[in-house]
Structure formats: structure tokens, C-alpha cells
Amino acid sequence: MNTRDLQAFVAVVESESMARAAQKVFLTQPGLTRRVQNLEAMLDTVLLDRQSKPLKPTAAGNEVYRLARTVLRAVDDLMAVASPDSESTGEMRIGMPPFLSEQALEHPVDCLRGAFPKLTLRVTAGWSPGLVQHVEGGGLDAAVVLMPEGVALPGTLTATLLGHKPFVAVAPRSFGLADAPTTLAQLARHSWVLNQDGCGMRSVLSRALSAAGLPFDVAVEAFGSELQLSLVARGMGIGLAVPEMLQASAHRDALQPIEVTDFRNVLSIWLVHGLLPGRLVRPVALMRDALARTLGLDRQGG
């Protein structure tokens, strides 16, 4: 099997166009077509639905695309073993929670692109428990996750503690909760506006309320910090936010951060990965350090 045929097919699927794929792999369009046809002939199956616009793979093509990417990544890893000092190439698949991907990814990506211009970055946003599972299963090379303090990460992964991130409970000023320090029991009388299950901040709150034997009434589940803060500002309930998001919110004047005396409102930030191929060791280390700088974290061993 010719890996150049696999590269051509992968480029077509990802570009959804023969013309764009030809430019991506530096082939003429007839040359690209021949490579895809070679692969179809070798596999004795049609890989592309040539009547669709944009161009789409067939059902068999989808499966071949998934496997082809795995093969091409393995080739990149073999080349890195053969030439350990060569420039990092191929893909690096990174997972991050929505807060980090929205607020803190720009500088790390700039650093990675500047240092490793031939490395393709694929960023996946998701809740931390799911990201950990994807790293365990090999679907991601590395992930930065937000976890409640004391939660154990799988022993099969390498976990580096980057630091800790505080967050705050926020209420509409109309609730009058800022006049004095507040307890969890007082907050539990109100409903909550939160992310879906899997959110690190929600997990910390849920654990604390459960440990105290207090009710946990979620009035609204909404994705996105600004939407949640707008709902809190309108009196739908109490929310949670990191200070940066609260400060940047268009609704901050209608919101009040709450001091909760019996609630440790802190998340641990971890970098997790499995056994890294040689070509990704330096990029993962650079991403770790750039992210820590962006978040203003003191690097800590873990």
C-alpha cells in the first residue's frame, strides 16, 4: 500500500474538494484523482460519493479515512524514532475544557505554531471526564483538564499538576447576598444556573452540597459562560464563574460575587497524556509551559 495514496484520500475527505485537496498535497488534480483511484482499486471499493456537493466519503470511505489517519500517524511516529532530532511533524491532538479553549488557548497555539510549523494541531473541546477517557483510549495525545481537588486520575496516564484555579459563586445583586459572608446552606435555598454534568466547577459544587446533605436544584443548564451570567443577572438563579469571565462579562454590573465561608471553590488543573511518541514530547512540554504562563499559574509537580 502506498502511503501517498492514503495522504491524497485523507486530503480529499478533509478538504471536501478535489481542487483544494490537490493544492494541499502539492499535486495536480489529475494526479490526485489517480492516487484516489489507485486506493479504490487496491481496496476494491468506492471511497467517494462523487455526486455529493461538497464531496463526501461513502460509508466504506469513512472507515478507510479513520484507519488511514491512524496509519499515517504511525508512519510519522516511526520517522520520529528513526530521526529523533528531526522537526516535529504530523498531528497533535489536544483536548481542553470549554473555559480553557475559549479563554487561554491563543498564546499556547501561537507558541506551538511558531516552534513547530509542520505540526498540525487538532483541538477538541469537551468536559474533563470525557477528555480523560479519550486520552486513555488513544483518541487524544494530551488533554488539559479541570478536576476537583483530591480526585484521582487514572494510573495509566502521566499527570502533571499545573496549578489551581479559583472560581466564584455569583448572584444577581437583587438577591442581596453580598451584605455578609454566606454559607452553602444559605445558597442551597436558591436554584442554580450551571453547565451540564462534566463541568469541573459544577462537580466541585455538587460534591460540597452532597457532603453537607444539602439540596441541589439546577433551574437551568446552559452551555457558555456569558449565557449563564446573563440568566443569573436576570434572576434565574445563582451561577459559577472564573474571575476572568466575570470581569469580561457584559452583565458584570448586575452581578455580585459571593463569599461562601464553607466552600472551597478551587479546581486543580492537570495536563494528562499517555506514552508520547518522540515527535510530540517537546510540543507537549511547550504547550504545558505556555498554558501555565497564560493562566498565571505557578508550575507544580504532580
Image (spheres, rainbow, N blue to C red):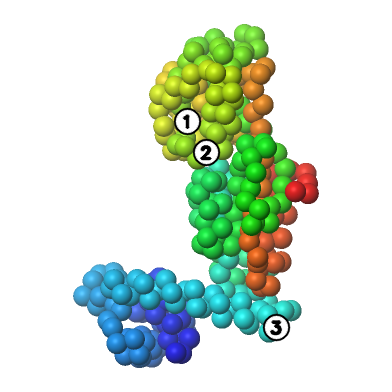
Q: Quadrant of residue 58?
A: bottom left
Viewer-proximal residue among 67 and 106: 67
Q: Secondary structure at mark 1?
A: strand
x and y, in percent, of residue 143 in the image: 59, 54
Whether residue 256 is visible, yes or no, is no
Amino acid carrying mark 2 in the image:
Cys
Q: Relative to the observer, which residue lies in front, 200 or 289?
A: 200
Q: Secondary structure at mark 3?
A: loop
The three-letter amino acid code for the residue at tag 3 is: Ser
Mark on residue 83? Answer: 3
Left or right: 8, with 82 as reference point: left
First reached walking from the N terminus: tag 3 or tag 1: 3
Would you name the residue on which mark 1 appears? Answer: 194
Could you say whether the residue bearing mark 2 is in a helix, strand or loop?
A: loop
Mark 3 nearby-residue class (10 Å; few <14, some 14–19, many ≥20):
few
Q: Quadrant of residue 207?
A: top right
Q: Position of residue 5 (x, y in %)?
A: 42, 86
Q: Is residue 138 above or below residue 128?
A: below
Which residue has dot 2 on it? 199
CB atoms at circles 1 and 2 under 8 Å apart?
A: yes
Going 68% across and 72% down the picture, which residue do you hit?
278
